[in-house]
Image: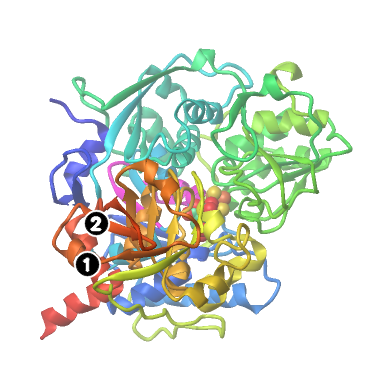
Amino acid sequence: MGLTVTEKIIAEHLVEGEMVPGSPIAIRIDQTLTQDATGTMAYLEFEAIGIPRVKTELSVSYVDHNLLQSDFRNADDHRFLQSIAAKFGIQFSRPGNGICHQVHLERFARPGKTLLGSDSHTPTAGGCGMLAMGAGGLDVAMAMAGEPFHLNMPLIVGVKLTGSLQPWVSPKDVILELLRQLSVKGGVGRVMEYFGPGVETLSVTDRAAIANIGTELGATGTVFPSDAVTRKFLESQGRGEQWVELVADDNVTYADLIEINLDELEPMVACPSSPDNVKKVSEVAGQPVSQVIIGSCANSSYRDIVLAAEALKDREIDKSVSFEINPGSRQVLENADAAGALRHLIHCGARIHQCGCLGCIGMGQAPATGTISMRTFTRNFPGRSGTKDDKVYLCSPEVAVAAAITGKITDPRELGDAPVVSLPDKYIINDNGIIPPPEDGTGVEVLRGPNIKPLPDFDPLPDDLKATAILKVGDNITTDHIMPAGSKILPLRSNIPAISEYVFSAIDPEFSSRAQQAGSVIIVGGENYGQGSSREHAALAPRYLGVRAKLVKSFARIHKANLVNFGIVPMTFADPADYDKVEQGAEITIPGIRAALLSGSDTVTVKIGSDQTIQAKLDLSERDRLILGAGSLLNWVRAKIGAQES
Ligand code: MIC
Ligand code: SF4
């Protein structure tokens, strides 16, 4: 039987296990990326491992999230990141150089390679024929130390594209359609692999826009083939020699097959407040809009910005709309300027911001109360924009521009002829925003600001667990619920005691003090618990507050891995109906939890109060169990290194 592109890359990098869907495997990681909001912790962790230089082919540290410098803290973190990158042999992409995924695609993505990033949208580079995955910072630190990445062999879903996109219909609509069909948990445990004649009609940045939001399906990754289009892209980036052809064999069988005819797609939007609440624009048209933003790692490439400029040429922005542009990278900005696009944007009244994540992670750009904000972003989870009860719609740049012109949600096809954007044969390339590390970093001093606190120590798992279920939540809880971001909380990412005060703050403001009072805590949840970002702070900070286990109906992949890394036992209800038996506030006992884990048992008995028992499943690899027993991945690694040395 032939191999898919994903299987070919995994086979080439496999160091442990067999490529049987669902079974644990470990693969070699060629490249890593970090961004500042997860990177400070990832480098503290790398430092704690105690290796003098990264062992990957390439590691890049980006600063793109925490760009607001309202006090010393973010600026201190930037200096810390720059100095530690120089010390350990890591490329450093300066603040303002662009969003990690956009810059990585432009300058570093390579077909056939593996990339692990401490950001959930790392699969963006899958648009260039890579296997790129998001992970917690500690997993990325381990990869930098040369350790393989552990995951379950994914199921490979084939997405066959036929036809071609019609005027005003965007690559974003492909992935919105998939979200409509599959929901935010439809991709869990899967890699979405695209093939078919429609793929050839999409540029690498179009493919990257689709791969980016594959994350919102809960997918482990999204992979496009590396073909003539990929070669042209790499040549336009002055990296033609890095191209290799990588396509699926003719006789492959996909675990599932989905077919999308691009000819039939229409402009779509994801309505508040979930990326899978997708409707045709025509179904929600006419509602007034107060803010329109083009940006984020999903849609801020050259094509997106120039398309907006062309559509706005000789037109005006509606007076009730704040129209904002967040370019994805300095390369995008410089090339869009050379093409004359900035002139049209400035002339029509756009607010042009620096290159970075900005409002996508609540770093400014919060919308006005009760009004609709149309954004080309990745996520519209409740309150993520920074405004309570926000009404954020996710859309393509085409739909965004139409709303900016009319002041209402509008089907862009009503605007007449669609702009046609041709991509440069050669982009203007200027890498002076990326600082390479010195050959030898041993003498480099790491600069630490007062807000950078050491990693807390965590104790091993006790023999029996006694804990209080101080919080019970429903389905699709996001990491934005567990550990919110935004301009107030993000600067605390390198200070666990301080950030832990905000755990679950949006849904339970007393959570942190109640957890500390309870001492030992268990959290009860529904389906797809922990969807969204890769932030390990959503495990690390709760662990600091005393959370020792989570009992839910199902987990999102990255969050579950982060729980294991920080010694929180992830358990699922053996019978989902038992969810109703646990009330918030219940006292829970799990006698012999440590022995059950270490002996490889698939279930444990959970006592609720004094009179009920239920069964919980432990769906964990042998390595996961050892890590949980040790209390954290770092404890386990340190013990292993200690055992090797003695
Ligand atoms: C996000 O989009 O939620 C983030 C901010 O990029 C996160 C990472 C983080 O929380 O730092 C992600 O997607 O992983
Ligand atoms: Fe940044 Fe938003 Fe992309 Fe996260 S989703 S990396 S915050 S642009």
Q: Is residue 171 visible?
A: yes
Name the spot of residue 91 as percent of width and height, x first: 42, 65
Q: Is residue 238 visible?
A: no
For label 1, the residue is 592
Mark 2 CB near ligand 1 (8 Å cut):
no
For label 2, the residue is 604
Name the spot of residue 596 as percent of width and height, x first: 19, 62
Q: Amino acid at mark 2?
A: Val
Q: Is residue 68 above or below residue 413?
A: below
Q: Write down the region rendered in magenta.
A: 101-117
Dot 1: within a 10 Å radius of its alpha carbon, few (fewer than 14), some, or many (20 or more) residues? Answer: some
Name the spot of residue 459 as percent of width and height, x first: 32, 79
Name the spot of residue 347 as percent of width and height, x first: 83, 40
Q: Are marks 1 and 2 in contact (CB under 8 Å)?
A: yes
Dot 2: within a 10 Å radius of its alpha carbon, few (fewer than 14), some, or many (20 or more) residues? Answer: many
Tell me the quarter of the picture where residue 361 sits: bottom right
